[in-house]
Amino acid sequence: MLKEVYANSSEPLEPPWSSIYPKSDPQLNVKNTLICHVIGFFPPPVRVSWTKNNVNVTDESTLSRYYPNKDGTLNVFSRLSFIPEEGDIYSCSVEHKALQQPQTRVWDVEITESSIGPSVFCGVGLALGLLGLTTGDFFIAKGN
């Protein structure tokens, strides 16, 4: 329906810009959602396709309705549920008639396990520093 409305439009074409990001901080083997945000295009439609390790997984994704911007362009969100596994590579590709070729964004699973090591070293260093300061003050006071 939208396609028919805009098919004969003399409006200039506005190509989309896209980005890909996880809904929440990824953790290995914990379900999450990848979002492909397609911004600033006109006219509709856009086509968003997904791959995981170069295998098409578009059937597992969803596409939101079109959201209008104040400048007359549109935004849309595509979502893909996934479980991060080390080394996986995901991509979303956007097709629009203002683009000569699909615009592809890539996101790869890189989980950095948080470590308490730096916090422990900082705490121990601070405690030793305060102990040294207190000891120094004691000996200075005793010497006077």
Image: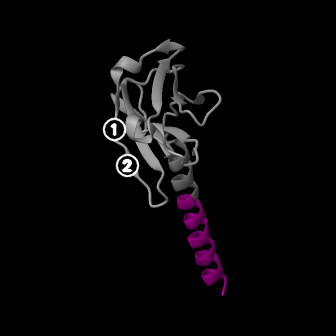
**For the residue carrying disc 2, how many other residues have a C-alpha within 10 Å: few (<14), some (14-19), or many (20+)?**
few
The residue carrying mark 1 is: 64
**For the residue carrying disc 1, how many other residues have a C-alpha within 10 Å: few (<14), some (14-19), or many (20+)?**
few
Question: Is residue 126 in view from this perspective?
Answer: yes
Image quadrant occupied by the C terminus: bottom right
Residue ID at (47%, 23%) = 50
Q: Foreground residue, 138 or 2?
A: 2
Q: Foreground residue, 36 or 129?
A: 36
Residue 26: x %, y % from top left? 43, 34
Pick out the residue farthest to the top: 55
Q: Quadrant of residue 83?
A: top left
Image quadrant occupied by the N terminus: top left
Give amino acid for label 1.
Ser
Q: Foreground residue, 64 or 36?
A: 64
The residue carrying mark 2 is: 67
Q: Is residue 30 left or right of residue 135?
A: left
Give amino acid for label 2.
Tyr
| Residue 1 included in the magenta stretch of the image | no
Residue 23: x %, y % from top left? 39, 40
Residue 119: x %, y % from top left? 51, 49
Q: How many marks?
A: 2
Q: Are marks 2 and 1 in contact (CB under 8 Å)?
A: yes
Which SS type dominates the magenta stretch? helix
Q: Which residues, given as a range, are shown in magenta? A: 126-144
Residue 77: x %, y % from top left? 40, 39
Residue ID at (53%, 42%) = 117
Q: Is residue 110 above or below residue 74?
A: above
The secondary structure type at the circle numbered 1 is loop
Q: What colour scheme has been applied to the protein in the rendered image? A: one colour
| Residue 140 included in the magenta stretch of the image | yes
The secondary structure type at the circle numbered 2 is strand
